[in-house]
Amino acid sequence: MRRLLLIPCLLTATLWSAPCFAQARSQLGPLCTTDTTPADQMIDACTKIIALKVFSGEKLATIYFWRSVGWNKKGNYAQVIADATEALHLKPSTPVYNLRGSAYYDKGEYDIAIADFNDALRMGPLSGIIFHNRGNAYRGKGDYARAIADYDAAIKAGPKSAFSYQNRGASKQALGDLDGALADINEAVRIDPSLPQPLISRAVIWRAKGDIARAIADTTEAIRLAKAKAPVNIMTPPGSVLISAYTQRGLAYEAKGDAAHAKEDYASVLEGVASDAGSKANQATAKVRLALLKETDAAPRKTAAAPAESSPAPAPPAPAAAAPAAPAARVQAAATVRRVALVIGNGAYAHVKALPNPPNDARAIAKSLRDIGFTVSEGLDLDRDAMQTTIHDFLREAARSQIAVVYFAGHGVQVDGRNYLVPVDIAFKAGARMTDAMVDMDTIMAGLDDQIRTNILILDACRNNPMAPQVASAGPSRGIEAGSGLAAPASLGSGSTLGAGTLIAFATAPGQVALDGEGANSPFSAALSRHVGTPGLEVQQMLTRVRAEVVAATKGKQVPWSNSSLLGEVYLAEQ
């Protein structure tokens, strides 16, 4: 369970003592203000009471509160926020701030959620429930230290809070403290063995430790428990428990090599109704993983038409040997960590401005990664079919890795806030859906989404919008035309890796163009290839050196930019 509910102190008996209407007082009131009332009946009853206009002030605020609870049961968080906001206008209260903050949390708007929880704590009285819920929001945005501090406070206030132990354990797991995480989650299971959620969290730890059998056993029991009875708390997003359990069991089956059972679980994930941000991210992952497994079954497989190479790293070890690193520890490029990379360079564009350097850039980066022990899948001048094939093959391979790197050089565009990589056969035609001819970066990120993997995505692509009138760029830049640039991810905590972390590096800043360069390589890729293999250089420090070199080489015309949710120091090359 992600969050807990506070109930207003205003008694139902007091609320309905006001003279009004006999039938409504005896029937509508209890239907509206009883937490076990089915959602539709609760909403209907509260709506009818509001329409009668017999209450005002604090009493009317209570009705809006309960109607927002009904909307919450349905997973309609926009309506939860609307009704809770109306209640706050009438009478601010701790329970309403808590409810609205929880709705913002489920929408993935963590900073706003934290602001509401802060207001709830300021109003008082101090509540372990509020600390728990604020901890969830901090965990959602990747601030695990603050999350753990809030869960500590929640546990101090309520030592029997299984969910606070579970979520504190999940935060420790994200920081790489697998033993501490396991101790907390075992305590949650001991406090309430009937809860499925701690078993799901424990399954992630087993998989990180390489104990796939236990991961499958825990998620199987979680699924049984979730089907046996509804969640014990009405604040749990509808369907979220089963979606999470099936996703984690599917990932465990896939790690085991049991594709048949993995496909069944991913299909079950997609049958659920996702209302909250976590469930939507799980469904995005399941959709990609299921498509990849089905593709493997298809015969005959289509062969990529463009050049592609794969060079294995020396003696890749078993995946069980690796685990996410704690912030104080270092993710070394040691033989115990299985690392894979996808490198694509597209320059021979047929219908938009061709770029001479991306294939050269891709070759240089691929060599640098191979030299430090990565298994590299390489593709040059790929059309859309070849890009899809190469990417899908890589995502299947990445399922068994602990560090995954994706590098793309070529044209990149933004459409409606989503980033796309452009194949060499792109052609803009009137009336055609342009996005169908490109590769969606969100699909790649969903395919890599896993709580036990570190992902590093590097885009040496222009940040332009293809919807602008000009179709081809007038100069040697990695763009299709001047525009608003690629979309910077607002958060790497939702819809992307929630565990070890994700880093996305762009060759240039928002709204700017990435230059193709006057030599054999782009300024960005030339600098990257020089520094990526430096022994003992942490990846974000490495990107800082690359940034400084690119700024100097371009005389300030190009400034690389990155967004990171990495939880610790990541080293691509051994010291």
Image (cartoon, rainbow, N blue to C red):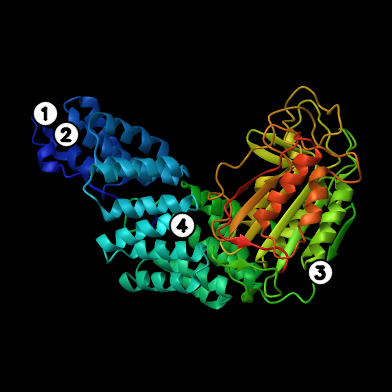
Tell me residue 186's x, y (percent). 39, 73
Badge 4 is on which residue?
A: 144
Q: Amino acid at mark 1?
A: Cys
Number of the front mark, 3 or 2: 3
Mark 4 and mark 1 lie on one chain; the one further toward the N terminus is 1
Number of the front mark, 4 or 2: 4
> Alpha carbon of mark 1 to alpha carbon of mark 2: how far?
8 Å
Mark 3 and mark 1 lie on one chain; the one further toward the N terminus is 1
Q: Classify mark 2: helix, strand or loop.
A: helix
Q: Classify mark 4: helix, strand or loop.
A: helix
Q: Classify mark 1: helix, strand or loop.
A: loop
- Cβ atoms under marks 3 and 1 closer than 8 Å: no
Q: Residues within 10 Å of mark 4 (few under 14, many from 20)?
A: many
Q: Quadrant of the C terminus?
A: bottom right
In the rendered image of this protein, does residue 359 appear above or below residue 508? below
Residue 507 in sight here: yes
Q: Amino acid at mark 3?
A: Pro
Which residue extends farthest top? 469
- Cβ atoms under marks 4 and 3 closer than 8 Å: no
Label ID, residue 312: 3
Q: Residues within 10 Å of mark 2 (few under 14, many from 20)?
A: some
In the rendered image of this protein, does residue 497 appear above or below residue 477? below
> Alpha carbon of mark 4 to alpha carbon of mark 1: how far?
51 Å
Tell me residue 178's x, y (percent). 50, 71
> Alpha carbon of mark 3 to alpha carbon of mark 2: how far?
72 Å
Badge 2 is on which residue?
A: 24
| Nearest to the observer: residue 382 or residue 274 | 382
Badge 1 is on which residue?
A: 20
Residue shown at 18% from the left, 27% from the top: 56
